[in-house]
Amino acid sequence: MQTVTIRLDGLGGMPMPETALKSVYASGMDFEPDERRLRITTDGQVELQVTQQPYRVHAKITVPLYGQLWVMADNLGQGYTGDFVDFVSEAVRTYVAHAQRLAEGISLSVETKGHLDAALELEHLANRGADTPDNRLYALSHAMYAAEGALVERARQQVYASPREDLLLGCNFARFTSASSRYAKFFSKAFDFATLPFYPSRTVPRKDTYDYGYVDKALGYLMEQHITPKGHPLFFGHKEVNPDWLFGLSYPELRKAAADIARHHVSTYADTIHYWDAMNEAHDWANCFELNQDQLLDLTRATTDALREASDKAVSIVNVCLPFAEYVAGRYNCYGPLPKRLRSPLGYLRAALEAGIDFDVVGIQLYFPGRDMVAVSLLLDAFASPGKPIHITEMGVNGGFRVKGNAGSSWSQLDMSEGTWHGGWNEHTQADWMEQFYTIAAARPEIKALSWWDFIEPSFSGNGAFLYENENPREMYFRYLAWKDRAIRKG
């Protein structure tokens, strides 16, 4: 372990606000976080304990004209080994380097080229001592826009030249009422993949008593429309989705119950549902049964094995949330004990693979990531490293308010990871984010499915659905259809 001094200058050369200073943490180059241990000095610098080499530095700061979000500095992609990082100047170098790397071999748009040129000129002025702190922050803003622009434009050229034929496009299908509803009409026009709710509080309200009323109704419509269904989840340690009878069981009893439920769900729908989220958020996050890490891994084995026993056609997905693992740095979770070292999503998946747990697909949730697209793409590199196919299983970003009543979640999953992007969330930036991320994802062959979470308000992510509560579509819906026409070729 070493002590690293991090300098964060704000506008006017003053140290950044205490909230920004307290947010700083280090990670490995695969984004695996160190637990945050820092001290703020009297002159506003951060002394940070770092355990990995090389390391990245992350801080949640306000970037002029861009937003308030997590920013990274990574020494031109090589990481740091020394004991001092001037964060803003290093972040500028980081994003300029990523922009230049991503721009190689393609013709940048006027907008992206302008951002890159602005970043280089403002960095030059800052290095010459001209309004150095302010110019560095504005250089960072332009560098982030330039790096994102180059990433998206490279991906767009690839995807539009060779549209995907194998990419499933889906959404949560939890509020179906009838085939004549506008909800159903808009859904079937947009998607060929649908997530059906199998939460035990609804499907197994009492022990050995199964209720598939909603599933059967919704599944019938999906089959008529030739939309591929997915069951979600076989197990999820969130208090609100589990029936009372599961609580108070010993671990062996809970394991048997979870396996029995998984086996019943999968075998009941063996002929119609071939995709299943076999385990959801079992990386020290959603742990309302207060299991230890060995038990969480063992429970993952129980549900994935039960799936295999029930159907040889079923695709087993192990689903994680908070992929940047800010909760590990901050040492908090949703439910359950706090072990000596919290397990990140990537750490949990690696442990599952090392333990020989049999699953097919890595599932990643990406709500309000509070990150720029370049950081998201680099994170996907890390999740692709085990060699498993990837599904983006849940997504949502804020579309802004237009009518009252679109209440979102106040869970720390969102509060601690969200940020603002490209000047602030509204219908336009929501549509921009969706289009940019879908384009980046479609350019990655390991990504086999993209599923937005909420189709209609109220939404988990808060104003994050395709439709308002009155079933009117947001701008994002039409942008999505236009994107799909260019990027996807099926049949």
Image (tube, rainbow, N blue to C red):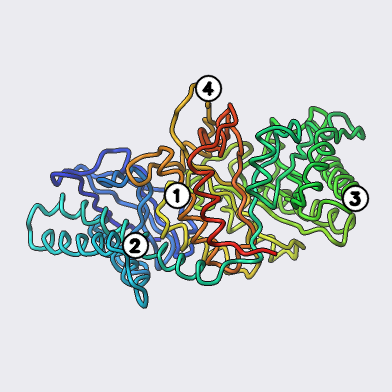
Kindly state the secondary structure of the residue where label 4 is placed: loop
Which sits in the foreground, 122 or 309? 122
Give the mark toward the camera: 1 or 2. Answer: 1
Mark 2 and mark 4: Cα distance apart in space: 37 Å
Residue at 40% x, 68% y is 54
Which sits in the foreground, 258 or 269? 269
Q: Return the x and y of residue 311 as percentages of the image width and height.
A: 88, 57
How many badges with numbers are in the image?
4
N-terminal-most mark, 4 or 1: 4
Kindly state the secondary structure of the residue where label 3 is placed: helix
Mark 3 and mark 1: Cα distance apart in space: 38 Å
Disc marking residue 147 = 2
Give the mark toward the camera: 2 or 4. Answer: 4
N-terminal-most mark, 2 or 4: 2
Mark 1 and mark 2: Cα distance apart in space: 15 Å
N-terminal-most mark, 1 or 2: 2
In the image, is 305 to the left or to the right of 54?
right
Disc marking residue 405 = 4
Residue at 45% x, 55% y is 436
Q: Kindly tell me whether residue 362 is visible in this rendering.
A: yes
The amino acid type, in three-letter code, at marker 4 is Gly
N-terminal-most mark, 3 or 1: 3
The amino acid type, in three-letter code, at marker 1 is Trp
Residue at 46% x, 65% y is 156
Residue linked to disc 3: 267
Residue linked to disc 1: 433
Mark 2 and mark 3: Cα distance apart in space: 47 Å
The reply to whether discs 2 and 3 touch (Cβ–Cβ < 8 Å) is no
Q: Kindly tell me whether residue 84 is visible in this rendering.
A: no
Say if 120 sits above or below 415 in the image.
Answer: below
Kindly state the secondary structure of the residue where label 1 is placed: helix
- Check the picture and name the quadrant holding the N terminus: bottom left
